[in-house]
Image (cartoon, helix red, strand yellow):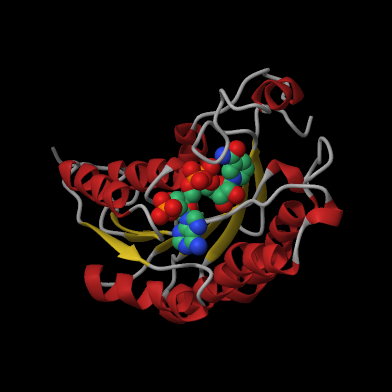
Amino acid sequence: MTSQGTLEGKVALVTGGSRGIGAATALRLAREGADVALTYVSAQDAAEDVVRAVEALGRRAVALRADAADAQEADGAVERTAKALGGLDVLVNNAGVGVLGPVETLSVADVDRVLAVNVRGVYLTCRAAAVRMGPGGRIVTIGTCMTQRVPGPGGTLYAMSKAALTGLTKALARELGPRGITANLVHPGPIDTDMNPADGPYAAGQAAMTALGRFGTADEVASTVAHLAGAAYVTGAEFAVDGGHAA
Ligand SMILES: NC(=O)c1ccc[n+]([C@@H]2O[C@H](COP(=O)([O-])OP(=O)(O)OC[C@H]3O[C@@H](n4cnc5c(N)ncnc54)[C@H](OP(=O)(O)O)[C@@H]3O)[C@@H](O)[C@H]2O)c1
């Protein structure tokens, strides 16, 4: 089966594409016509499943082990993508980790780990993309609804790390706009993934915080990411895909 869509002939890199929102995004971009590189850190089998699913859509795909917490690996994913697939047109910064808990209990190691993955890794991958991308390049980053509204205790470190992505996205939009490259930020609400299962112990409370009264799906986030990957006149913007969590 071949795909036809707005991303025909483009090359995309999705960080953390082995599971959850990243895997759904990799498949959605492939359905729109893109070839896709995806990174993972531990779930090699799951990453290879996504590669096979992309290939079944008639697109090329490659899974790259690249730990976003490692500066060299975060930086190197872009060039590895370009080498494997011939360039880079779309970067989706999706890989992220959450360490939740009372502020008094979070260790220096927790802070370093979360900032390394959620902030420094994103910065370094964007930096490499800025070198590699030409006009028409698209950067889409995954934030969280918790930067817009924190519904309860325990989110200090995670919300702080994701809030940095607003500054990064707006500044990148200004810096790369003259080259025809856009940068946008998507804030998911509670989404049913391994990170935040819809049958988990805190799920009912999270669903109740949304206007729609339910968790979202990874596909519902992926469709907004794919739209932004094809949109030429949207940049420096933030999009809530949160079922009304911020309403
Ligand atoms: N689910 C939600 O409710 C929700 C809400 C708001 C925002 N988000 C954000 O959405 C993004 C995706 O979340 P998700 O729910 O899909 O999570 P998930 O199901 O836990 O999947 C996380 C993905 O990121 C990868 N990853 C984790 N640490 C990594 C690292 N150090 N280097 C490279 N890849 C790494 C994982 O790779 P492996 O498979 O190899 O472990 C996996 O592919 C995250 O940025 C998260 O903060 C999620």
Pinpoint residue 214: horizontal percent, then vertical percent.
62, 20
Above or below 91: residue 149 = above
Q: Which residue, as the protein is rendered here, is positioned at the far top?
A: 213
Q: Which residue, as the protein is rendered here, is positioned at the far left?
A: 1
Pinpoint residue 188: horizontal percent, then vertical percent.
62, 40
Quarter of the picture holding the N terminus = top left
| Number of marks drawn | 0
Pinpoint residue 21: horizontal percent, then vertical percent.
47, 42
Above or below 89: residue 191 = above
**Quarter-of-image position of residue 106:** bottom right
**Quarter-of-image position of residue 169:** bottom right
Above or below 201: residue 235 = below
Q: Is residue 86 left or right of residue 165?
A: left
Quarter of the picture holding the C terminus = top right
Q: Is residue 137 left or right of residue 2?
A: right
Residue drawn at 74 percent across, 44 percent down: 146
Q: Is residue 179 visible?
A: no
Foreground: 241 or 191?
191
Pinpoint residue 246: horizontal percent, then vertical percent.
77, 34
Foreground: 138 or 154?
154
Residue drawn at 54 percent across, 76 percent down: 124
Residue drawn at 40 percent across, 40 percent down: 24
Q: Is residue 222 visible?
A: yes
Q: Is residue 152 left or right of residue 15?
A: right
Foreground: 9 or 61?
61
